[in-house]
Amino acid sequence: GTAAAGAVQRRWTPSDDAALRHQVELLGHKWKEVSSQLPGTSASSCKHRLTLLQRAEKKAAAGEPSRQQNVPWTVAEENLLARAVEPYLTAASIDYSTIRSSYFAGQKRRR
């Protein structure tokens, strides 16, 4: 159905993408009809999502890298990084927790 005004946006999942493609195969580019089959979407969000998917496919076919997504660092990854830089820190230098809190605060890694 149509997304209600002021509705909270959510990320598209791979199953949402598959459902979108399926509806477009069945209905063509009749975006209101397509969105009516995909709860929580609008005609414009369906059209925009399909455009993004098609661009990504073209880039992949041309061997170009896809856009990376920002995802939060896991605790394990932060610990791995801390162990990796530890040999380079001296007693006179700043400690990793200070680096993390000042540089990585609120940062997300790219995947």
Image: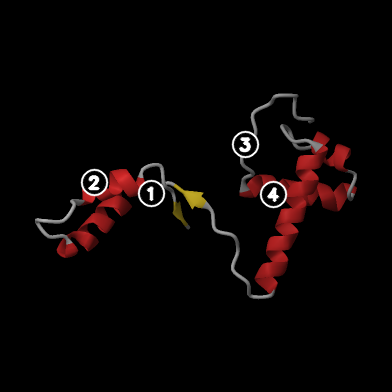
- Badge 1: few (under 14), some or many (20 or more) residues near its Cα, within 10 Å? some
Q: Which residue is drawn at 15% across and 64% down?
A: 87
Left or right relative to 66: residue 111: left
Q: Residues under labels 3 and 4: Cα distance? A: 13 Å
Q: Earlier in the sequence, mark 1 or mark 3?
A: 3
Q: Which of marks 2 and 1 is in front?
A: 2
| Nearer to us: label 3 or label 4 | 3
Query: Alpha-carbon distance for marks 2 and 4?
Result: 41 Å
The mark nearer the N terminus, 2 or 1, is 1
Q: What residue type is labelled 3?
A: Arg
Residue ID at (80%, 41%):
44
Residue 50, how many percent across, how many down? 76, 52
Residues marked 3 and 4 touching at CB (< 8 Å) = no
Label 3 sits on residue? 10
Q: Are marks 3 and 2 in contact (CB under 8 Å)?
A: no
- Image spot of residue 34 (x, y percent): 83, 41
Q: Residue at horizontal 18%, vertical 64%?
A: 88
Mark 3 or mark 4: name the one nearer the start of the chain: 3
**Which amino acid type is marked by label 2?**
Thr
Q: Which mark is residue 17?
A: 4
Which comes sooner in the sequence, label 4 or label 1? 4
> Mark 1–mark 3 contact, CB under 8 Å?
no
Instruction: Evaluate whether residue 18 shows in this view.
Output: yes
Residue 41: x %, y % from top left: 74, 35
Q: In this view, does 88 lie above or below 99?
A: below
Report the residue marked by disc 1. 73
Q: Contact (CB < 8 A) between labels 2 and 1? A: no
Discs 4, 1 touching: Cβ within 8 Å: no
Q: Which of marks 2 and 4 is nearer the N terminus?
A: 4
